[in-house]
Structure formats: C-alpha cells, structure tokens
Amino acid sequence: MATTVKKSRDHRGKWATRKPHSYLFSYCTIQRKDSQKLVPAVLQVVKTELNDEAGLTQAFREQDVFISAVGVPAFENEKIWLDVAIAASVKRIIPSEFTTNLESPLAIQLPVATEKVKARQYLTSKITSSSAPTT
C-alpha cells in the first residue's frame, strides 16, 4: 500500500471534531485496480496499476508526503513510485524501510534489506541530482 498526504485547506469541517488528525491533512491511498481491501472512510482511494505512471502521477499530484508501506518492496515498483513522486514535486518521500535499520552495516547485508537498500540508494541519487524540492 502506498499512501500520500496533503495538507488540508479547510479545517473547519464537522468531521474535524471527530477525527483530530483529519482536519490537518487529507490522505490518499493507492491500491491495485483489482484490490478488494477495505480502507478507512477518512482515506481517499485511487485504484491504479502500481506500475502505471499516468495513474500514479494523478494520485501524487499536489501531495505533500509519499509513504511507501509495502511489506516486501519490489525495487522495480518502488523505483517507478519514487520517480513519479519526485516528478510531482512531493515534498517528503518515505520509502518502505520499516523493520530494518538501514544505518547498520550488518542489517543492510540481510537478504530482507536488499530491495530496501536499492530503493534508498536510488532515492538518494535522484534527490541530490534533481532540482525538485524533495527530501
């Protein structure tokens, strides 16, 4: 699952009193077209193929943050998502690095970390060589 976050323009809505975090941000979840997974009503859902650059570009437009939360990331998909997020000027990108401390030289040698290391290295190289305001 990939999630994007955008600051909310209007934080006076009635729903804001029920969900304190909701009035500050709007959330968009990206799912595969054929996914039947239910998501909380507070999330806007965009269904697209996870390698469809046009569909992803639409979902990433005007988003402040992109959080990749896939269980076992596949670098091929992650690379597309990172490229689209950078091209859409997403301000903050959080790749799927959960459960692995990529600051540890021992951890990055683990098989489970291989794709995560590739994604981080790719993202770092793209951000430093890009004029996009992404961090």
Image (tube, rainbow, N blue to C red):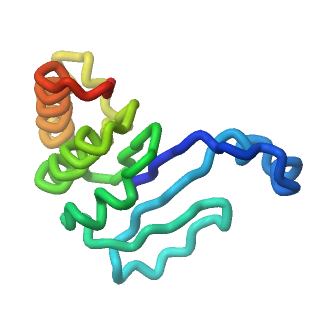
The residue depicted at 57 percent of the width and 68 percent of the height is 39
Q: Which x, y percent locates residue 34?
A: 35, 83
Above/below status of 96 relative to 57: above
Above/below status of 35 relative to 4: below
Q: Is residue 93 left or right of residue 106?
A: right
Is residue 115 something that shows in the picture? yes
Location of the N terminus (image quadrant): bottom left
Above/below status of 44 relative to 32: above
Q: Which x, y percent locates residue 41?
A: 67, 67
Q: Is residue 27 left or right of residue 30?
A: right
Q: Nearer the viewer, residue 50 or 75?
A: 50
Is residue 99 something that shows in the picture? no
Q: Which x, y percent locates residue 31?
A: 39, 68
Q: Nearer the viewer, residue 41 or 61?
A: 61
Above/below status of 55 relative to 124: below
Q: Nearer the viewer, residue 51 or 73?
A: 51
* Quadrant position of residue 50: bottom left
The residue depicted at 39 percent of the width and 31 percent of the height is 91
Location of the C terminus (image quadrant): top left
